[in-house]
Amino acid sequence: MLKKLDEIKAQAVEELAQISDKAELESLRVSKLGKKGVITSILKQMGSLSAEERPVVGQKANQIRGEIEALIKQKQADLQQAEQNLKLAAETVDVTIPGKQPEIGHTHPLSIVLDEVKDIFSGMGFDVVEGPEVEWDYYNFEALNIPEGHPARDTQDTFYITEKMLLRTQTSPVQIRTMEKRNPPLRVIAPGRVYRSDAVDATHSPLFHQIEGLVIDEGITMADLKGTLEAFAKRLYGEQTETRFRPHHFPFTEPSCEMDVSCFKCGGKGCSMCKGEGWIEILGGGMVHPKVLKNGGVDAEKYSGFAFGIGLERLVMFRFGIDDMRLLYENNMKFLEQF
């Protein structure tokens, strides 16, 4: 039996050297050390031994069992390490290989021009303010000298939520809200979305953007408005840009005007962009009406001011030669990738 036990160990060592996975190792453990294993079968035969032989064989059997268990444990550790090495090798990243360049977004044409407009007016000392898009009738119409019955209040043009609440049709309500919160002197622009009940076509949309401007101080005149807007136009379209002011009417300014700029495509000679006129209208403005100053809590006897409203989409379309406003909202990647 002692010789048999030595043979079992030698056989276990030989078989362990050939094992390459955990399943084979478990099979060997069961065959050598399990309840029906070879060492257990030898121990069951100890009843046929003499009293002097039993302790010798028992001690030898326990020694061989312990040695085989140690060998199996070591083999198990070796297999686990080999498995870990293979996994690490498979997951190795070659840091010298150039990475894949991720495709990232870029600034929308509306934002490109809006950022430029903000920079221009910020450089002239204007603050950027905001107001709610869901507005009260008072701020959108009444406080701006647009009384009951005025065509601008028509339900065909305005998205009413309730009788007194609506989606703002212009950014002009921010004028009143700013005057209520701040004391003169004021110099602000208010960009934002506005809503009107227009059918969607190449030049109209029920949602578009305006940039409201407001300046209030002592001694403000029409010359200040003209100088400010001329400086804005030259910064946006180039120093060669010429401006033209035409009389107009807005309920919240008096006197009122519209400003044209010389066509930046043809230089004023006439082309398809300016429809042969050589001029392009870009904004409206005027001196803030005394009633509007009063409604904003400003002393109209002491202070005067000017206001203007710019259509952002109009600026963008002229700037980039876009002939259909819908392109700005349809998220067409072929179109947007050009910017």
Image (spheres, helix red, strand yellow):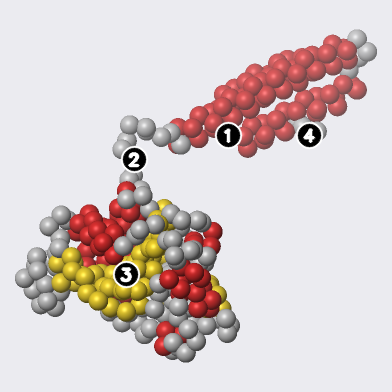
Which secondary structure lies at badge 3?
A: strand
Binning the other alpha carbons within 10 Å of mark 3 as few (below 14), some (14 to 19) or many (20 upward) gives many
Q: Quadrant of residue 237?
A: bottom left
Give the quarter of the figure containing the N terminus. Answer: top right
- Residue at 43% x, 54% y is 185
| Residue to which mark 4 is pinned | 36
Indicate the quadrant where residue 328 lies. Answer: bottom left
The amino acid type of the residue labelled 1 equals Asp
Measured in 3D between alpha carbons, the distance from the residue under mark 3 to the one under mark 2, in whole angstroms, is 53 Å
Residue 26 position within the rendered picture, expressed as x and y whole percent measured from the top left: 67, 34
Which label lies toward us, 1 or 3?
3
> Which residue is the extreme one toward the left?
269
User: Please, what secondary structure does the residue beneath circle 1 have?
Assistant: loop
Whether residue 92 is visible, yes or no, is: yes
What's the residue at 45%, 36% (across, down)? Answer: 90
Separation of marks 2 and 1 at Cα, in angstroms: 36 Å
Circle 3: residue type = Gly
Of the pair 24 and 31, the residue shown nearer to us: 24
Q: Tell me, for residue 285, which label it has, or none.
A: 3
Residue at the disc numbered 1 = 21
Q: Secondary structure at mark 2?
A: loop
* 2 over 222 or under it: above or below: above
Residue 22 lies left or right of residue 147; in this view the side is right
| Dot placed on the residue nearer the N-terminal end, 4 or 3 | 4
Q: How far apart are the two marked residues, 1 and 3, measured between alpha carbons?
A: 84 Å
Which comes before the other along the chain, label 3 or label 2?
2
Q: Which secondary structure lies at badge 4?
A: loop
Q: Which residue is mark 2?
A: 99
- Dot placed on the residue nearer the N-terminal end, 1 or 4: 1
